[in-house]
Amino acid sequence: MAVPFLENWLKNKWVLHALRIAFAAVITILLAPFKLDVLEYTTYDWRMQLTPRPPVSGNVVLLSIDRETLEKLKREPEALDWAVVLQKLALGNPAQVVSFINPSQIQGSYDDLQLLADVAGRLPFQYGDDDLPKPGLGKLAQLAPPFEKLTITPAPRTVDWTLLAKDGATRRLIYSYEGQPTLHPQLAERFNGLSQDWQYSGLFDVLESKQMLVRYRNKGSYPRIKFINALEGSINPADVAGKIVLIGRDTTEISKDYATTPLDKSLVSMSVLELHANILDTLILNQAPRISPDWVKILVTFLISLLAIYVVMSVRPGKGLVVLGTAVGIYLLAAMALFATMRWVVPVAHPLVAVFICYYFVIPYRLIIENRRSWEYYQKNRLLIQVEELKSNFMRMMSHDLKTPLARIQGMTDVIRQDSLSETQGRALNSISESTEELTDFIGSILSLSRIESKELKLQLRSRDVNQLVREAIRRTEYLAKKKDIEVVDELEPLFSIKVDEDLLKTVLINLLENAIKYSNNRTRIMVTTEEVDNDLVIQVSDQGRGIPKEELAHIFDRFYRARNSRSITAGNGLGLYLAKYFVELHNGRIDVESVLDKGSTFTVRLPMNLHKDTEQFEAQGGLYV
């Protein structure tokens, strides 16, 4: 009792909906704790690469020690070289000069180093150290003399070895550490006036720091002054006036001078100098990408899971893959559009994994259901085949058994007609004879139908004059036409003989003529024509009968179908036109009808003149099986 109850309970549509929603919720809850940062930030990189880059702020200029500088000096720039370049920078009145090269590591005599310290002290100059203060100290140690009076500020860069995509790329900037802002937000405040962390978008907590994602520009986006050009020439004051000048190395010799980014993972994809410029502009323009809250991830994962479950359970596997692929593609495009227009980083990894899990967990259940249905269909089909065979055997047996007594009845009526009969007896005998003929025709139709359904019908093609077959069909139906005083007129064009099955085509013509006679009024005319049109043999049978309603024209060739306006008036079994259509199509032809209610109908049979070209290969076998 429990199993049938459970099956009936599971068939309830509301129960099925509830189970699908519950399964989607379970998948969402199980996935939520997992960190899928590798996949998430791989797709983040795609969004960064495929969306337009924002413009630069115009407040940052790079002063680079490059390969050309080393080749011309044949050495690293020394303290005196630095002093000369800083003096030229001072003439342009920059807002800030930041060196990412430690002044204590610059070579030179003590006097040259002292000169450099004095020149740097007269500038708004500071050293950005790629380090953070030790926990609890709040600031970095001073530089060694003679640079102890120069400002040193933390300007660390991050590398994603243990976080996010774990591929060594730099995606994050550190806004503050232990509540103290780093170099970049301090410089950005001079241009955007933002002094509080809540005024920035995209901040998130990592250990004791507040961080955000960097919004990158393409390599080479920032104006650049080569150190050697500044040393040997002059610096245009307009190029640096009121701007932040960043000094660093870009020699392509030392790997630590370069960083990999979401835009490019190659070894020297972007110099650290240009990386700091991107960090500064992200803060100055407040353009950090904004990571969506966790509730968005949970909601989207649940909705995607629910969609995947419904698609897998309701749609065929091939179509289901297309639907799911399209849905995932639309979601990815939406995620990219949100990133490009609003800098929102919506979750992608959890929804994608949810689709994968739902598909591969639900598909086996779907297969079990499909296999069970297939087995049920197989059993039903097997039973139906057996019933159909029994029906066909019964029909054939009964038809054959009925033909013998019908032939005897017909023979006896012919014998009795030879005797003198009264008028009443003659009418009764004629009625018996007509009923016998109708029953014989019906049995013939049933036998033909049985042969069609059992695939036993064999097309015997022989070269025949179709006009001769038409005349013979007219002779066979002449008696019926005379009883209703109907004139059958034939207009037959001379035709070449074509290969047809004589018996089947004759059956088609007799059926069309008998129908035309049955459904025509007394003392009307039936026209039969033949002609060759566009390499087709066209036979038309037109009557002036009651016609066929327009809405029923599409069904008159259906098996056992009869028009409503003829069911109670004329006897019939609804098989004649069905068989006629079938026999015509066996000849690669077609049959059409045109009818106007109360004015008549025209049936048109088209047969190909070159049918034998398609069937010659079957003639050696004695015919064409269909």
Image (tube, rainbow, N blue to C red):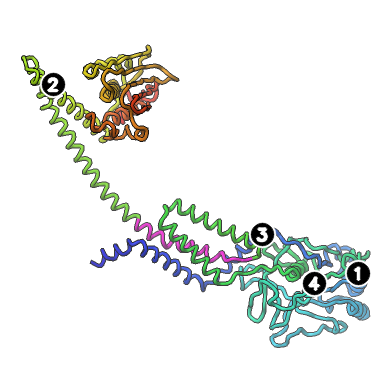
The residue tagged 3 is 49
State the quadrant of the C terminus: top left
Q: Is residue 255 visible?
A: no
Using the numbered discs, state the Cα–Cα distance from disc 1 to disc 4 in whole angstroms: 18 Å
Q: Which residue is mark 1?
A: 92
Q: Is residue 319 above or below residue 350?
A: above
**Which amino acid is tagged 4?**
Phe
355 left or right of 461?
Answer: right
Residue type at the position of mark 2: Asn
State whether residue 178 appears in this view.
yes
Q: How far across and how far down the image is residue 65, in percent?
A: 84, 67
Give neighbour class at mark 3: few <14, some 14-19, many 20+ (Cα, 10 Å): some
Q: Position of residue 156 (x, y in %)?
A: 73, 75
Q: What's drawn in magenta, residue-wise?
A: 344-369
Q: Whole-Å distance between the Cαs marked 3 and 1? A: 36 Å
Q: Earlier in the sequence, mark 2 or mark 4?
A: 4
Distance between the alpha carbons at the discs numbered 2 and 1: 127 Å
Secondary structure state at the residue bearing disc 4: helix
Q: Quadrant of the N terminus?
A: bottom left
Judge depth for marks 4 and 3 and give the one in front. 4
Q: Could you tell whether 26 is left or right of 273 in the image?
A: left
Q: Earlier in the sequence, mark 2 or mark 1?
A: 1
In the rendered view, tell whether residue 187 sits above or below residue 376: below
- Asked which quadrant contains residue 205, the reply is bottom right
For residue 398: magenta? no
Where does label 2 land, which residue?
Answer: 430
Instruction: For the residues labelled 2 and 3, say whether their Cβ atoms are less than 8 Å apart.
Output: no
Residue topped by disc 4:
191
For residue 15, which numbered disc appears in the image? Answer: none
Q: Report the residue at 9% width, 17% height from top.
A: 417
Do the CB atoms of the residues marked 4 and 3 lie less than 8 Å apart?
A: no
Q: Magenta stretch: dominant SS?
A: helix
